Amino acid sequence: MFLKTSRYSNTETLTTTDARKREVKAIKLRRLPELNGDDMMIVNGSQLDVMSKQQYRDGTRFWHIADANTELEANALVQTSGRKIKTPKP
């Protein structure tokens, strides 16, 4: 269902019904791991995929950084220059 590099690749799925009584598949909420990482300062033009490439040698692992922070929308993490965000250690 998901790519093996996706944050959802090993997440359990379940079957439920929606408001119209149709059967739908959904992923079960997953617990986020404890953070063991460092602060990183956001500068104008920061991009999560570039930060991920520098930190993990893989730009598609940006979701590790997103998970380590409380922002619901990952791109919101890099919108404000001067903000400090957490970056987990590889």
Image: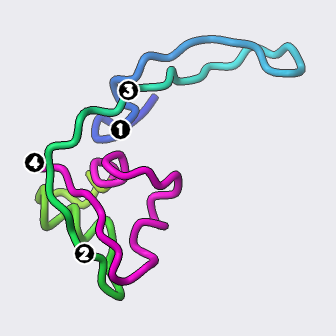
Looking at marks 4 and 2 on the same chain, the residue that comes earlier in the sequence is marked by: 2
Q: Is residue 70 magenta?
A: yes
**Mark 1 belongs to which amino acid?**
Arg
Label 3 sits on residue: 31
Residue located beneath label 2 in the image: 41
Which label's residue is closer to the chain start, 3 or 4?
A: 3
Image: 73 above or below 26: below
Instruction: Look at the numbered disc 1 and give the secondary structure of its residue.
Output: loop
Residue 10 in percent (x, y) is at 33, 24
The quadrant in which residue 26 appears is top right
Taking the view exactly as shown, the residue that stands out farthest to the bottom is: 44
Q: Residue at x 28, y 48 (%)?
A: 64
Q: Position of residue 82 (x, y in %)?
A: 33, 81
Mark 1 or 4 closer to N-term?
1
Q: Which residue is mark 4?
A: 90
- Whole-Å distance between the Cαs marked 3 and 4? 19 Å
SS label for mark 3? loop
Badge 3 crowding class, 10 Å Cα cut-off, few under 14, some 14 to 19, many 20 or more, is few
For badge 3, the amino acid type reads Arg
88 relative position to 76: left or right: left
